[in-house]
Amino acid sequence: MKTKRFGVSLDENLVDSFDAFIAKHHFPNRSQAIGFLIQKNLTEEKWEENREVAGAIVLVYDHHRRELQNRSTHIQHDFHHLVLSVQHVHLDHHNCLETIAVKGRARELAEFSDRLIGIKGVMYGKLVMCSL
Ligand code: NI
């Protein structure tokens, strides 16, 4: 992709805070950090407009929890039109890490993700979305 240069003038305090943000998140330079923040905001805007986005739902759970896997499978079938792939990794004797790649309308993805994360016994869950 072609890059374009442009000048930015900001309040000194804001630049200091921005540089601290860059250091904390290990961005290689200001351009990379600005690009990330713009992309993040555009994604959120599309989410609000319910546009088509792609992403992943990450779940960590103990597969011994009764009914958890059945409930998860049931919900994934209800939203099967959003699912691109599912990867299941057995972390140890108890814990499973599931990554579900998804694509669809932002609000529907959020609902799908909320339903999965809300299953009793899910220890960690997060939806990551990126605008297309
Ligand atoms: Ni497992």
Image: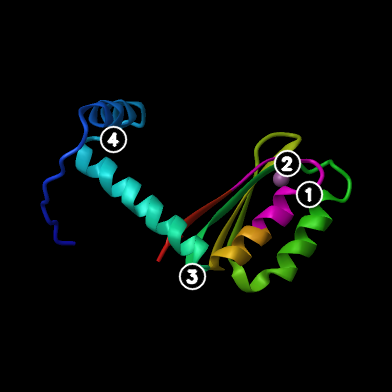
Label disc, if present, on residue 61 of the rendered structure: 2
Q: Secondary structure at mark 1?
A: loop
Name the residue tied to disc 3. 52
Please name the colour scheme applied to the rendered image.
rainbow
User: How many discs appear?
Assistant: 4
For disc 2, does the CB lie below 8 Å from ligand 1? no
Choose the circle earlier in sequence order: 4 or 3: 4
Tell me: 42 left or right of 122.
left
Locate residue 98 relative to residue 29 in the image: left or right: right
Question: Between 27 and 93, which is closer to the camera in this rendering?
Answer: 27
Label 4, on which residue?
Answer: 27
**Residue 120 on image: x %, y %:** 82, 44
Identify the residue at horizontal 67%, vertical 61% (top origin).
Answer: 112
Q: Which residue is mark 1?
A: 119
Q: CA distance from mark 2 to mark 3?
A: 28 Å
Whether tag 1 and tag 2 are in contact, CB under 8 A, the answer is yes
Image spot of residue 16 (x, y percent): 25, 26
Q: CA distance from mark 2 to mark 4?
A: 32 Å
- Counting residues from the start of the chain, the first of labels 4 and 1 encountered is 4
| Mark 4 Cβ and ligand 1 under 8 Å apart | no
Amino acid of disc 2: Tyr
Q: Residues within 10 Å of mark 3 (few under 14, many from 20)?
A: some
Q: Identity of the amino acid at label 4? A: Phe
Estimate the spatial distance between the alpha carbons at disc 3 and disc 1, rounded to whole Å: 25 Å
Answer yes or no: disc 3 within 8 Å of ligand 1: no
First of labels 2, 3 by sequence position: 3
Label 2: few (<14), some or many (≥20) within 10 Å?
many
Between the residue at mark 4 and the residue at mark 1, the CA separation in whole angstroms equals 35 Å
Amino acid at dot 3: Glu
What whole-number distance in Å separates the C-alpha atoms at marks 1 and 2?
10 Å
